[in-house]
Amino acid sequence: MRVFTTSFVHPAASLLALALLAVPAAATAQVREGADRADPAWYAGWAARELRVPLERLTADFERIQAELQAQRREAEAQGRDGERPARWEAQYEAARQAIERAQWSQAVQQFTALAAARTPRADAAMYWRAYALDKMNQHADALAAVSDLLKTFPASRWMGDARALELQVRQRVGQSVPMDTGDDELKLLAIQGLQQTAPERAVPLLMKVINDVGSVRLKERALFVLAQSSTPEARATLEKVARGSANPELQVKAVQYIAMSGRPEKATLLDSLYASASDVEMKRQVLRAFAMGGDRQRVLTAALTEKAPELRTEAVRQLGMLGAREELWQLYQKESAIDVKRGILTALARAGAVQRLGEVVATEKDPQLRAVAVRQFGMAGGRGAGETLVPLYAKESDVQVRRAIIDALGYQNNAEVLVSLARKETNPELRRELVRRLSFMRSPAAVEYLTEILNK
């Protein structure tokens, strides 16, 4: 269900839509000669002044619409909660990591604290980065407490080594005696980069030492990037070792990305091996993206056909859409049984520009939920030409959810003429209000004339 909120609507347009719903049927006031009929602000003022819409009724309609919107929003949230929550967590985690990169320590602490408290799939990583940010804010006692919480809560986490390294660094900074050299990370990296330019044979062993020794994750990530530029067997072996999971998960993902970007002839075989041996869903997802980055359509398709985890099939489908694999996606749609994955295939078909296939789904799909998704994607991918398919479908469609999707699709195209023709024939009060609401946001002459016609009745 598509949810509209008044926060995205121009105030004048909102008032006009409310006036249209509240105006008495007997109102016969004439439109001022020479007025700018395309100006929503003028119509809002005219409706309020000339038609003298009772304030009490206008307020009641506003409250009713607000209540409808809130109910729709709650329903949409309830329907999408299970499927959308992992993606939302991932987005929040990435935003918090960006705060770390920008040295926005206070913001990072707040975001990672929320992620850790929610026990998200990356709660252990969130706890580590929270401690890291607290240390950067010189809140050393809180940082140590955060590390302790991580060690107790996730004793088997792959972040344990980094957490203990951070703990040693913090203890040294507060004056406790620890057998560890915590020199300036930036200076170390600059020195390594300098050696890479002037004496690469000496830089590689030092990079390997930085990655394998106790130290900050940030320095390790940068060292790994410099190491990935080297063509020596030692550098390649270290990069592969990290990619196979000898370090924390984020460093492992970086290694996979660097392998994908390399020009190594054996990278496809290596990535294939990494995918087969990985047990972590995030790791497999990164390898699928690496396949797509290299244009390896066949391996992505194989994962979409054989992978048991729906979230990985969905990821493979997404990558096929980016690769423009129209026929492969169509074959997958015929075979797939999971609704969420089929929904993803429809989105991927639109991304790949498979307008004809989306039209076939619109015409033949039996499931109303999927038909509604297909209609919206068809409307966005097919442009105004899609109206030739959608208008006849609206006339014979019995499912309200699908009819709403058709209204949405025609609205995406700004197809006011067709929306007006549908509104003239619509007998369902709820759908007619939706059509009028859509038209009230448009500046098309056809929309303006129809709204004027309603007001003059």
Image (spheres, rainbow, N blue to C red):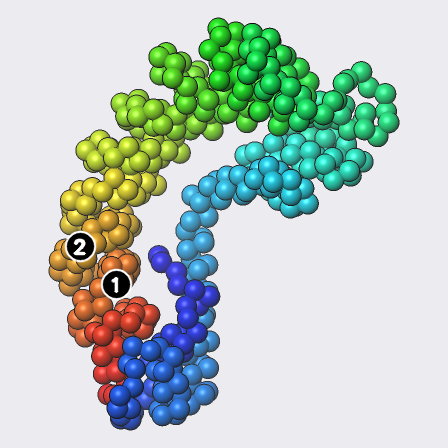
Residue 369, given in percent of the width and then of the height, sits at 29, 50
Q: Which residue is painted at 71% across and 22% down in the image? A: 165
| Residue 115 in view (yes/no) | no
Compare marks 1 and 2 and give the one earlier in the sequence.
Answer: 2
Q: Is residue 105 left or right of residue 95?
A: right
| Viewport quadrant of the N terminus | bottom left
Task: Using the rendered view, name the quadrant where residue 267 is placed.
Answer: top left
Amino acid on which the number 1 mark rests in the picture: Asn
Q: CA distance from mark 1 to mark 2?
A: 12 Å
- Work out which quarter of the rendered image holds the C terminus and state it: bottom left
Q: Which of 341/291 is in front?
A: 291
Residue for point 39% across, 14% down: 264
Residue denoted by label 1: 414
Q: Is residue 244 above or below residue 42?
A: above
Q: Which residue was labeled with disc 2?
A: 386
Give the SS element for disc 2. Answer: helix
Q: Quadrant of residue 396?
A: bottom left
Q: Position of residue 248 (x, y in %)?
A: 58, 23
Q: Kindly identify the residue that appears in the image at 28 percent across and 81 percent down.
A: 37
